[in-house]
Every structure is written in C-alpha cells, then in structure tokens.
Amino acid sequence: MNNLFNNDFKFKKRFGQNFLKDKNILSKIIKESHFEKDSLVLEIGCGCGYLTEVLVENGYNVLGYEVDKTLTEVLKEKENKNFKVIIDDFLNRNITEDIKDYCFNKIYAIGNIPYYITTPIIEKLINSGINFNSIILMVQKEVAERITSLPNNKSYGSLTVYLNYNYDIKNIMNVDKKSFFPVPKVDSSVIMFCSKEKIKVLDELHFYRIIRKSFSQKRKTLKNNLKEYNFDFIKEILNKYGFDDKVRAEQIPINLFAEISNYLITKNC
C-alpha cells in the first residue's frame, strides 16, 4: 500500500477523512461481506485506495467514488481493468447511468462513510432502484447501535424502522478508533444490509410518514404524535397486540407500524 501519510497530505474535516490503515481488518471486512465473483462492487469514498486495493486483490470489479479532488492522482494511478474511479460527490451521481456499461451477476456497495452523511447515502442507495444484494458500511459505533436497535431500546427510532423495513441488518464487527488515521474520537462498526422480502404495505410514502410522525417527539405517546389521524382506528390495532393509549413509538415493532399504516389507508385517513 502506498503510504499517503508520508506525503504531507492534508486531511479534511469537512469530508470526515479518517482512513482505515490496517490491512488485516480490511481483509476481514471483505471476508465477512461474502461478495461473489463476477460481481460489481461500488466503493463509496475510496480515500487513498486502501480498501480498493484489497477488493481488487480479491478479484472484484470495483467502481469507486471519491469527493476529494486532491486524491485524484493517487486513485487514478490505481486504475486498471478491474477498477475505475469517479472523482465526484456520490450524492450527486446517477448510479444507474454510472453502471450501465458494466456486466455483472450481482451488485454490492461498500464504504467507510462519515456520520453526517450516513443517512443521505443509505437513502440514495435505497431509492436508486438498484437491487443491491448487500450494502456494507463502516459507521460510528453509536450509529450502528441505533440502526440495529430493537423495540424498547432508547436507540430505536424512525431511522431504525425505515432501514429495517428495507433490509435485514446486522453488525458484523466493531473497529477500534486506533485502527484509523487520523485517530477519530469514537470507535466504529461495520454493518451489513442484506436484501429481504419486505413487509407488505399498501403505500410506502404513507408508511414512512406514519413512522416519522410517530417518532417526532419521542417522549410523547403515539396518540399525541399521531393526533392528526383518527386514533380510534389506530387503537383497534394497538389493542389487538396488547398495547394501550400510553404506548410510545419506541415500543412498536416494524410489522405493527405497517399494519397501522395499511389500516388507516383502508379507512381513508
């Protein structure tokens, strides 16, 4: 691996640049990801290309994205028949257009992404219309705990419900902050999103709206947060599962949110 750290590289806080430098951990991430051969891997945030090198060494075709133009030369030097890089903000890209000339059996996404754009990147992948077989992301450990949280946990929120509706999610490993350079203030976790058969909802936008409003004020009851809806209908579903008027959103499992949303639609509210 090229030692970028000896070349007076100026790390940029605005890009959340903390590069994972431990090749053993990088190799373990690839092993745990279970990527199949003849697949296309989208790498979000190539940085200086350490993960890129491991991916290519393992025989995968990689299309990388990197927003920092000062890394153009470093990454362009690594380009070959198995790796191409796009120097641009991933959030501004049309992914479908970017991959149109690639032939592959399965497609995956992987990346070490900063906290402040974790949700936008995941939403972009989900809304791209591309059927990713899995998405592997390195995020702050606290964010991973939130995403993988279960009901009756304070970390359980609207993001948890939204993401777990779309994917089966698990934490595949934790990574100590000392494995990065510069050393961040917090530890990280690698989480895997795997495609799943979704719970049936009649209208996804309505379902998402119910979720957002249910968690809009976490200390308040579901009844207070959903007061614009006819709560008598919602109460019918809650009582069916043994919940009363004082239940809060953090106590409600995903399938119950889906049932509430569907029932309200059938009642035209």
Image (tube, helix red, strand yellow):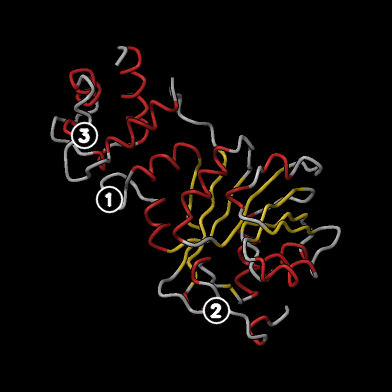
Q: Give the spatial CA distance, label 3 vs label 1.
A: 19 Å
Q: Give the spatial CA distance, label 3 vs label 2.
A: 43 Å
The residue under label 1 is 153
Three-letter residue code for mark 3: Asn
The residue under label 3 is 225
Query: If the image is split into quadrants, where does the C terminus sit?
Result: top left
Q: Residue 107, image x and y in percent?
A: 69, 45
Q: Which residue is rendered at x = 36% and y = 20% of the image? A: 262
Q: Residue 243, image x and y in percent?
A: 19, 31
In the rendered structure, the answer to whether residue 43 lies left or right of residue 200 reads right
Looking at marks 3 and 1 on the same chain, the residue that comes earlier in the sequence is marked by 1
Q: Label 3, secondary structure: give it.
A: helix
Query: If the image is split into quadrants, where does the N terminus sit?
Result: bottom right
Q: Label 2, secondary structure: give it.
A: strand
**What is the crowding at mark 3: few (fewer than 14 residues within 10 Å), some, or many (at least 20)?**
many
The residue under label 2 is 181
Three-letter residue code for mark 2: Phe
Q: Give the spatial CA distance, label 2 vs label 1.
A: 32 Å
| The furthest residue to the front | 69
Q: Residue 268, image x and y in percent?
A: 32, 12
Looking at marks 3 and 2 on the same chain, the residue that comes earlier in the sequence is marked by 2
Three-letter residue code for mark 1: Asn
Looking at marks 2 and 1 on the same chain, the residue that comes earlier in the sequence is marked by 1
Q: Residue 141, image x and y in percent?
A: 42, 63
Select label 2 or label 1 by which is in front. Answer: 2
43 versus 12 height, above or below? above
In the rendered structure, the answer to whether residue 243 lies left or right of residue 67 reads left
